[in-house]
Image (spheres, rainbow, N blue to C red):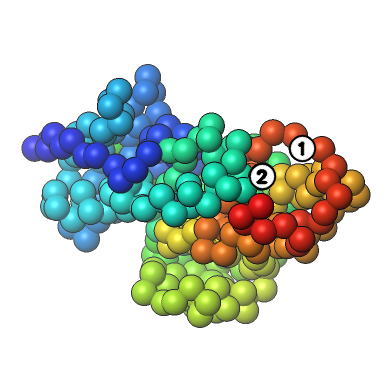
Amino acid sequence: MTALIELRPRGPYHLRMSLGPARDGTVRVRDGVAELAFATPGGPAHARVAQQADGALRIALDAPDEPSALDRLRFLLAVDDDIEPFLAMAARDSLLREPVARARGLRAARVGTCLHALVRGLAGQLITAREAWDIERVIVQRAGLAHAGLRLSPGRDDLARLSAAQIASSGLAPRRASALVRVSRMLDLERLLGVPSEAAASRLLREPQLGPWTVATVFLHGLGRYDRGLVGDLGLIKLCSALLGRRAEAEDTADLLAPYGEWAGLASLHLLRAPRVERQERAPRARTASA
């Protein structure tokens, strides 16, 4: 039986913006309605979500265990995140003020498993967004189980069915494909949900091919944490280059994001939407979040 639920997000929230391009195969958006397939302890679930004019979400949920499925859906959509402290900080920040004002309801929606977030992180290293989405979609299509016309985010058992060579044939670089297989076999990434951020990041960074950008992607879209910025993102490198008046490096993006502390991940998403900026006399490291 389908359960009909109305859910009101905490604070400003924009469903379509937070879901992003929705190209991984686990989410589909048509005519303003988002469909999601995701795993729950009781079995696979399917949800149709539409946002009303007053901001509330109207949900049609098919799941063997409605309460656990709704809890999981709330996490995936990031509707319970309290971003008011971030919004207050952004209103005082010279770089964040404008992009955040235009996208106050932006959250980092999550994928169904931390392993899927790792796939996204490895696929997106130093290539265009379109290429990264294509690689991620193929891997999810091959590894994730089908449900309600969509795919479930792959877990460890799902990925175990694929060899590194099969994953590499999706377009992922062979070394990254090998890293994905190795990490999926050695680590249960879901356990990192209960691990402090510093410890979780340190553990991931010990793995070859997993750098700060990939770890930040796992934090944002797998663990649901905002305290790791997208250091080295090509878009942020371009932004830093405009700020500095020279070719920027990954370290410059780290300096840019450092003042945002626990909100560096969400700040990254907004800065990637920032309009073109002119050269400034101060380097990013000289800025403060309250500038």
Q: Residue at x 42, y 73 (%)?
A: 192
Residue 3: x percent and y percent?
12, 38
Secondary element at tag 2: loop
The residue to which callout 1 is attached is 277
Q: Residue at x 76, y 62 (%)?
A: 285
Secondary element at tag 1: loop
How many residues crowd around disc 2 within 10 Å: few (fewer than 14), some, or many (20 or more)?
Answer: some
Under mark 1, the amino acid is Val
Q: Does residue 213 lie above or below 237 as drawn?
A: below
Residue 137: x percent and y percent?
52, 43
Q: Is residue 239 visible?
A: yes
Residue 192 in the figure: left or right of residue 121: left
Tell me the tag on residue 205. none
How many residues crowd around disc 1 within 10 Å: few (fewer than 14), some, or many (20 or more)?
Answer: few
Residue 277: x percent and y percent?
77, 37
Q: Residue at x 85, y 42 (%)?
A: 279
Q: Quadrant of residue 7?
A: top left
Q: Nearer the viewer, residue 245 or 1?
A: 245
The residue to which callout 2 is attached is 95
Q: Nearer the viewer, residue 253 or 83?
A: 83
Q: Earlier in the sequence, mark 1 or mark 2?
A: 2
Residue 210: x percent and y percent?
64, 68
